[in-house]
Image (cartoon, grey):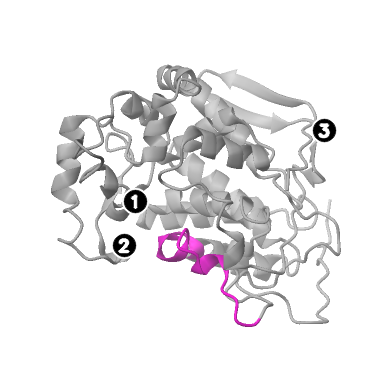
């Protein structure tokens, strides 16, 4: 299920040291196009921007959640908004939402729903939920410090969502570099993309159950993972009691920031923390312990401008994974949580332009 990725003339336009945007020349990526809704729904992207900004003002943690929704959607069946569906078309099956990789940890679904309903009131039957997710992820990144990048659009929404599709498609908290690289390459991405997109862990966090194995009875002769900074491990122990001394329900366990130094800023601090032995998950720590990826970690830790540039490129590339762009492959859902009714004809409403 390799990504059908063809990026024509990707260029980085540097307008100043502190202001730049990644643009896609020729505007075509796998049938996607920058400015796809310029005629049919010219306010689509700005509407998503305004809603994301408003929601993040009330809850800054939504930024990490929205970016995570984008990643988890694209890596399971492609960027088709299948992660948003509440029901499957197969009786008795559960959806991607019901997977342990998603479930209660999905944060930001309400923002996507608000954006969709608002856009439907402006441009009925026009903007896909998959594109709204991509726009929202970009706006979430900007809200927490990224300079921004162009988002090619034209994705269509999938009609199926199965929990059984999730295993093997998403990295786990104990994944090795080999595991992580394998998953990314399968999606048409590179090991470099994997290291760069891991930088999203500059924001957000994880519940104790995702890393407590590193703090207690780690291995024979080692109570704590020896690759962890011992002071950091001691701090985590104060937050996360040993197994058996707290609820087994992950939802009721404490949540710890990936990057305690700048947990609400998307920056290169995450990589600096890894080099200091303060990677929260085993999969984070693996990036600095593995000689194949450590040099890039060191490079990104030193150069925040480089991190932002590569993050933008990787997010654009992520947004092309197994997209549905041909009529008949997918649909424009009227509601993100449900497929359209059988036989329902959904055609864009094109506004009359005045000059």
**Residue that badge 2 annotates:** 250
The crowding category of the residue bearing disc 1, from other C-alpha atoms within 10 Å (few below 14, some 14 to 19, many at least 20), is some
Residue 316, position in %: x, y? 65, 38
The crowding category of the residue bearing disc 2, from other C-alpha atoms within 10 Å (few below 14, some 14 to 19, many at least 20), is some
The one nearer the camera, 189 or 311, is 189
Q: Which residues are magenta?
A: 91-109
Q: Are marks 1 and 2 in contact (CB under 8 Å)?
A: yes
Question: Would you say 162 lies left or right of 8 here?
Answer: left
Task: Tell whether position 102 is magenta.
Answer: yes
Residue 52, position in %: x, y? 50, 54
**Residue that badge 3 annotates:** 26
The one nearer the camera, 235 or 29, is 235
Question: Would you say 56 lies left or right of 166 here?
Answer: left
Q: Nearer the viewer, mark 2 or mark 3?
A: 2
**Residue that badge 1 annotates:** 210
Q: Nearer the viewer, mark 1 or mark 3?
A: 1
Q: Is residue 147 visible?
A: no
| Secondary structure category for the residue under label 2 | helix
Q: Residue at x 28, y 32 (%)?
A: 278
Q: Residue at x 75, y 45 (%)?
A: 35
Q: Residue at x 45, y 65 (%)?
A: 103
Q: Main secondary structure of the magenta part?
A: loop
The crowding category of the residue bearing disc 3, from other C-alpha atoms within 10 Å (few below 14, some 14 to 19, many at least 20), is few
Q: Residue at x 37, y 47 (%)?
A: 204
Mark carried by residue 175: none
Residue 269 sits in quarter: top left
């Amino acid at each position: 299920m390799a990504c059908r990725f063809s990026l024509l003339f990707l260029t980085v336009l540097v307008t100043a040291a502190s202001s730049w945007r990644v643009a896609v020349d020729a505007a075509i990526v796998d049938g996607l196009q920058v400015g796809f809704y310029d005629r049919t729904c010219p306010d689509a992207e700005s509407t998503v921007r305004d809603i994301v900004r408003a929601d993040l003002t009330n809850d800054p943690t939504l930024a990490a959640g929205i970016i995570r929704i984008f990643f988890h959607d694209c890596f399971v069946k492609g960027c088709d908004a299948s992660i948003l569906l509440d029901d499957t078309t197969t009786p008795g099956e559960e959806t991607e939402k019901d997977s342990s990789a998603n479930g209660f940890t999905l944060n930001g679904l309400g923002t996507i729903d608000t954006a969709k309903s608002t856009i439907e009131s402006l441009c009925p039957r026009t903007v896909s939920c998959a594109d709204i997710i991509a726009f929202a992820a970009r706006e979430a990144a900007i809200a927490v410090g990224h300079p921004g990048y162009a988002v090619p659009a034209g994705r269509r929404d999938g009609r199926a969502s199965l929990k059984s599709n999730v295993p093997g498609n998403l990295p786990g908290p104990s994944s090795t570099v080999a595991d992580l690289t394998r998953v990314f390459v399968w999606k048409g991405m590179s090991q470099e993309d994997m290291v760069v997109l891991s930088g999203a862990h500059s924001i957000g966090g994880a519940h104790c159950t995702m890393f407590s194995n590193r703090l207690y009875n780690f291995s024979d002769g080692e109570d704590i993972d020896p690759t962890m900074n011992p002071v950091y491990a001691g701090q985590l122990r104060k937050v996360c009691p040993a197994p058996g001394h707290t609820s087994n329900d992950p939802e009721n366990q404490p949540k710890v920031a990936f990057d305690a130094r700048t947990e609400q800023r998307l920056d290169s601090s995450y990589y600096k923390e890894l080099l200091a032995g303060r990677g929260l998950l085993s999969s984070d720590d693996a990036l600095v312990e593995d000689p194949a990826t450590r040099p890039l970690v060191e490079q990104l830790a030193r150069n925040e401008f480089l991190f932002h540039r590569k993050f933008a490129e990787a997010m654009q590339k992520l947004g092309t994974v197994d997209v549905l762009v041909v009529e008949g492959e997918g649909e424009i859902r009227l509601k993100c949580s449900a497929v359209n009714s059988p036989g329902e004809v959904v055609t864009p409403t094109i506004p009359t332009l005045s000059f």
